[in-house]
Image (cartoon, rainbow, N blue to C red):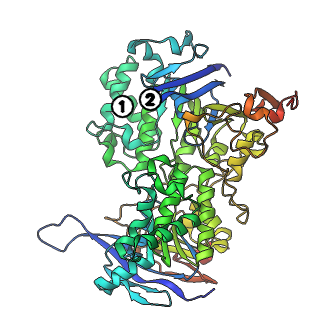
Amino acid sequence: MSRLIDVENLTLQFDTDEGRITAVDNVSFSLEAGEVMGLVGESGSGKSVTAKSLMKLNPGNAVYGPDSKITLHLADGPVDVLSLKTDREMKIVRGGSISLIFQEPMASFAPAISIGDQMVEQLLIHTSYSKQQAKEVSIEMLDRVGISDPSTRFGQYAFELSGGMRQRAMIAMALSTKPKLLIADEPTTALDVTIQAQVIDLMKDLVSEFGMGIIFITHDLGVIAQTADKVAVMYLGRLVEQGSVRDVIRKPAHPYTRGLLAALPKLDDMDAPLTPIPGDIPSPLERPSGCVYHTRCQEVVGPRCAAEVPEFSNVDEDHFASCHLYDAKGDTA
Amino acid sequence: MSTKPLMAAKGLSVHYALRGKLIGPKAYVGAVENVDIEIKAGSFFGLVGESGSGKTTLGRAMLRAAPISRGDVLFDDGEVSYSLKKLGKKELKDYRKRAQLIFQDPYAALSPRMTVRDIIAEPLEVMGLTKNRAETDARVREIAAKCRLNVEHLRRFPHAFSGGQRQRISIARALVSGPKFIVADESVAALDVSIQADVLNLLKAIQQEMGLTFLFISHDLSVVAHVCDHVAVMYLGRIVETAPTRTLFSGPRHPYTKALLSAIPSLDPDDRGKAQKLEGEIPSPTNPPPGCKFQTRCPAAIDRCRVEEPVLETAGVEHKVACHRWQELSD
């Protein structure tokens, strides 16, 4: 496997009327080609904002930290994503090497342009296909994602397709440019379980066929367990745990990950009580000091949790948690 | 606990007229077709199915918020009994006190211009349940405390609250008129898991404390498994299987229920891809297939399924299933 993308010390703030809000705080991770990374967290944890940074899609009031660095490794050399300025330069990451699938497929297609025209348009921008070739590739792609009668669907509009079909068309469109990295932002959340299972299967097939990397954003740990190779857990803009899917789900190290798993209704133990994480996720305007999770944490080690930001420590091989429980120093206070 | 049904649907159908043609018979969509279910007093009854299966419409028909085209829904809480089809204006007003709805989206369900106190008090004022402001306030405070809202929360506006807190406000508003029957339509679907657990625990606690009966509509089977004592599975407007929760989850009989259960993503990373996958999608109710409605996607469909619609048969204690082949398939 070869390295696909490196995210180093990504910090992202938004200027708002109420002040500067930190959305992503010093996040680092990397992804190999052909690898699926699950990005998990509650709403407001910064997972979508992190993913959008990879395509520099955040709005104009976004301020990236000075040490933030995103490097995309392409065949003809690395690209420093955050240094891209003009729309023309950004074509490499927006739809070229990176594609994005949104949660709401209805909102992601233009309602008054046929599915086919939208697919052809982006192929004409990103590839050297002729209009006719682009049409052929698009129809082939629709067929590939399991849409029956693709040449008819090609001429239809988003409202004529059902939810599952729209999500498939969205995936077909995202993949037709053969991206190196696919970002899927809650791609199955709006779907029924049976359709969700179909879409998950489809995405797994496509990874093995095209060998791209996928960043799969979801709050559903079941979906992560079924799709991801590794998992990164975010809370309030910080990465709190990172590791292989087996380690994170079976041996969660960070108290927040443990809390998420305890809150999940499990089918194999219907009598187990559901344990909510106490309290609510704090407003980004009132970010807690020290460890961002200490206000809700059940396993606070001492005053250090409220004072010091925990470093990432090794819990196990390739399994990291940012928590004072794992600091070698012990509590000094 | 009493075993008398609080709610009973008898051959209930809900039809919506399609845009009419001038000549010929009126076209309609059968959103709910010939449904028979009984919800016992004090139970937490789950209703599951994919979108388009008619579960919301059935819930609304039980609240007299959807038209009852055929059949009837009977309500009997021990004090009064109503046939929902024949409710008069005054009776309907009384029924509204006894049956309430909790919505899915706590962001859309609360008026941004009303304080929490006013939101919770509104049903009392509209229904004329309290005589003066002091009495209203006392009742609002009592219900708010039950839903774990503080007194100072009552003076604020909904925008100041998180999703979980808003859902608690919606619950308080539904409970304030002292209902016996609550329809919770996807009430935790929009919430994060940690908050979802909190709201589910609250609903369960309130149900036990106040002796309520819940119709819990959800597409999330693992949530239903945790809170409901009885479950009905819907497909294209029909009940295809109904059973006590444990029976349904340990021994599903209908191929659709089996497929639904196996489609739930397992939390075990080593248990991938074993699920029995359902092909295709739910057909449109404007043009339902003949025979069994599930035959177009059923892995076990035979010729008989394509012509004859199965009826609910008894498959065990309180367990009913509508499938021609459930007996052969359960071996």
Could you confirm whether marks 2 and 1 are on the same chain? yes
Label 1 sits on a secondary structure element that is helix
Q: Is residue B250 above or below residue A161?
A: below
x%, y% of residue A62? 47, 23
Whether pointer 2 and pointer 1 mark residues with C-beta atoms closer than 8 Å, the reply is yes
Identified at 43% across, 69% down, the residue is: B293
x%, y% of residue B309? 43, 77
Q: In this view, does B245 lie above or below B185?
A: below
Q: Mark 1 points at which residue?
A: A119
x%, y% of residue B157? 44, 51
Residue B51 disc label = none
Which quadrant is the C terminus of chain B positioned in?
bottom right
Q: Which amino acid does label 2 sit on?
A: Ser
Q: In this view, does B57 lie above or below B194?
A: below
Q: Nearer the viewer, residue B71 or B223?
A: B223
Left or right of A312 on screen, residue B256: left
